Image (cartoon, rainbow, N blue to C red):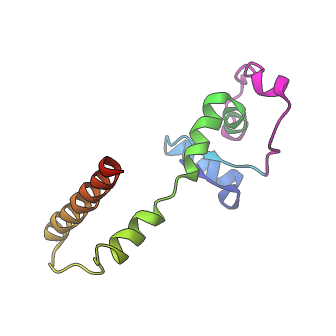
Amino acid sequence: MLADTRYFSADNVKTCSEQRIEPLIAMGRDSHNLPLAERLAQDAPAPENDDPLVNMAWSLKTKEGKARYAKRKSTVKAVFGIIKHVLGFRQFSLRGLDTVKGEWKLVSIAFNLKRMHVLAVG
């Protein structure tokens, strides 16, 4: 589970661990533009501790943990804006979960085809 600082608490980390969910929750602000020696340094060895908070803090400092946490920055809002504004899809026409799922799949296919066309044409 990826989350930013406002969701950090020892209770949240413990609850995630109890549910067998690996939390990656920022514990505070990290400094950017680290010196080259720090960026290229090997990861510290894993702690020999069963405390989920200590393990999460270690995981966030590893190269793999940083790469996984960076995925949190991906933006999905633009896709919904395009679907609403460009495709004009603002509400579902059908009722029932199964039919709405089918309608959403059609909208998603339309968006993906439009996107592929734009990428192919240039």
Q: Is residue 36 left or right of residue 1?
A: right
Which residue occupies 35% across, 50% down?
119
Which residue occupies 17% across, 81% down?
93
Which residue occupies 33% across, 55% down?
118
Segment tinted magenta in the rendering: 29-53
Which residue occupies 15% across, 79% down?
95
Magenta-drawn stretch contains 41:
yes
Residue 58 lies in quadrant: top right
Magenta-drawn stretch contains 35:
yes
Q: Is residue 47 left or right of residue 95?
A: right
Q: Main secondary structure of the magenta part?
A: loop
Residue 50 in the image: x percent, y percent? 67, 31
Residue 111 in the image: x percent, y percent? 28, 61
**Vertical relation: 64 (above or below) 7:** above
Q: How many marks?
A: 0
Residue 8 in the image: x percent, y percent? 69, 55
The residue nearer to you, when weighing 78 against 27, is 78
Q: Going by the picture, which residue comes out furthest to the front?
A: 122
